[in-house]
Amino acid sequence: MSDPHGKAWWNIPYYFYSPLMFYMEEDLEEYIFGPEDEYLRRMEVHSNTLIQLERGFTASGQTRVSVVGPFQARLWVMNMIRKVGSQNTFDQTTGKIMLLRIRSQPLSEQDLKFDPESGSSLWFPD
């Protein structure tokens, strides 16, 4: 994933402005990123993002997650995490499928596409 002029995404300053930040529970963080962040690097490479985890950021022990990179990729990562942690069984299953995908292969342009025709809620909550 790069710009039309052939630059790698990490050489485009725009992708580092306004990181996407959110908080997650410690057990969800370990489930998604693995013990000792075993899957973190692979997930960054497969999503073309940089993900920073700041453990114990809040008094209740939540982890602050900051994501930089191409906008669609940032949203995809956030949505995957939101769905994995959802109480809704369908969303949780969708999130786990997304998690397996990002751990096993790079995201494609199709993965990052929002299709209003199909009613896809890839980026937006129900």
Image (tube, rainbow, N blue to C red):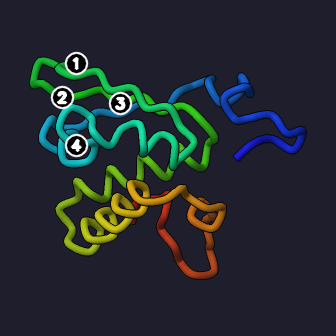
**x, y percent for residue 28:** 18, 45
Q: Quadrant of residue 23?
A: top left
Q: Which mark is residue 62?
A: 2
Q: Is residue 106 above or below residue 53?
A: below
First of labels 4, 3 by sequence position: 4
Q: Quadrant of residue 109?
A: bottom right
First of labels 1, 3 by sequence position: 1
Which of the image's four quarters has the C terminus? bottom left
Mark 4: few, some, or many residues within 10 Å (few <14, many ≥20)? few
Mark 1 — residue? 57
Mark 2: few, some, or many residues within 10 Å (few <14, many ≥20)? some
Residue type, numbered disc 2:
Gln
Q: CA distance from mark 1 to mark 3?
A: 10 Å
Residue under the image location 80 percent in, 41 percent down: 3
**x, y percent for residue 66:** 42, 28
- Residue 63 shown left or right of residue 1 in the figure: left
Mark 3 — residue? 65
Q: CA distance from mark 4 to mark 3?
A: 15 Å
Residue type, numbered disc 1:
Phe
The foreground one among 3 and 63 is 3
Residue type, numbered disc 3:
Val
